[in-house]
Image (cartoon, rainbow, N blue to C red):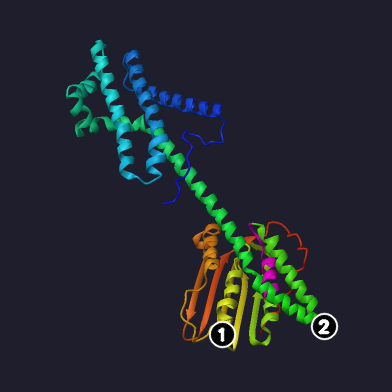
Amino acid sequence: MGKPLSLAPSFVPRTYSGRARVALHLTMWTGLMGFEYLLSLLQPTLPAITFALMAKDLVAAVVGFYFFSHVVLPRFIVRRRWLLSGLGLGAIYYFWALLSHATYAALVQSGAALGEWGTYVHRTLDKGVWVGVFSWYGVSMGLNDFIIIPLQPILLRFLLFLLTSSNRSLRLQRENLNLEINFLKAQVNPHFLFNTLNNIYTMVVKQDERAPAMVQHLAHLMHYTMYESDAAQVPVRQETGFLAAYLELERLRYGQKVSIGYQQSGPIDQFQVTPLLFFPFVENAFKHGIDSSLEASWVTISLKVQNAQLRFEVSNSCSPAAPRREFGGVGIANVRQRLALHFAPADYNLVITHDLAAHTYRVSLTLRLSPLAAPARPPVVPAPALTPTP
């Protein structure tokens, strides 16, 4: 079991100062008593009796609220100790019921004129403590009153706990995804970088005229992963520029052994997208598809924008002798989580298939795009243009 969530024992978050917390608590209790006083006007009686009944409810509400906040919630509910949680809530109710019984007995003992309250009070007192408080007869009579007044602060505290926990979970999820995005950046791994630099070195030694362009592609790739992809949304043009640099370097790496095709269409300059969504699929196409194939390997990529929707597809060959496997790994799982976090379920669709007969892996991702809010700042290193293949 994981470490329980840390809870502020008071009604308000810890970010408030001590005086502010006290003021807010006092406001809450004052409001609760004001609400009960308004209810008492529906069944008027002597002021002394009204305030005695309000006092016992206030004491029960305060004790129950802080017992719930300091004990039941952090020690039982958060740790999923449901039996102890139920016993704790039952203890809060029976504390109020016993306090009510004692208050009714004191009022009768004082000889005060209870008026319309007399019938209710005697229905509880005449049955004695066991029947009037602990039996189902007593619970059925007192539960409605308990829900109306003493239980309200507890419900409010529990609601605040749910909201705080939800926000904390969402924040932790975002932080975890940020760490995983850094992992994706690391997927442009040292092995890939080493091979690329070796190839560029060979081209420089041979005075190949393509060497400067390859250095430029590598510089753009590293610049994008280190700086530009930190934003929540990037222009689609920048994302395709990153893919362009990556594909050019893979062409350099594999040469004529692999056929790499790309097609792009639509107004990509008008929209933005979450960064590094496409790269894990492309990287997997090379790592798990091309590297496992002996000959006639190929990768085809298409990106189409139409009616504010982007359709991205990656297909690659795989070796017929390669064992059947689940597509992807940590990178693909990360993309799934990021899609669920950044898009509504109706705004994206991801389909991954392994066609055994055709020896092909295929990924199809459809996204609803956001319009580009402002002109993007030009990258320091210009993005290379992809050359569509017929």
Residue 179: give x, y in percent of width and height.
Answer: 59, 58
Q: Residues within 10 Å of mark 2 (few under 14, many from 20)?
A: few
Is residue 368 something one can see in this rendering?
yes
Viewer-nearest residue: 226 or 45:
226
Q: Give me the residue at 17% from left, 22% from top.
A: 126
Callout 1 amino acid:
Ser
Camera-side residue of 94 and 364: 94
Q: Which residue is mark 1?
A: 293
Which stretch did the figure color magenta?
232-246
State the residue position of label 2.
Answer: 207
Q: Is residue 178 left or right of residue 90?
A: right
Percent position (x, y) of residue 274?
Answer: 61, 61
Relative to residue 17, is residue 39 drawn left or right? left
* Identity of the residue furthest to the bottom in this view: 295
* Cα distance in 3D space between marks 2 and 1: 31 Å
Question: Which is nearer the eye, 225 or 154?
Answer: 225
Which quadrant of the view contains residue 20?
top right
**Mark 1 Cα shell of 10 Å, populated few (<14), some (14-19), many (≥20):** some
Of residue 258 and residue 54, the one placed in the foreground of this image is: 258
Query: Callout 2: helix, strand or loop?
Result: loop
2 or 1: tag closer to the N-terminus: 2
Whether residue 327 is in magenta: the answer is no
x%, y% of residue 118? 23, 18
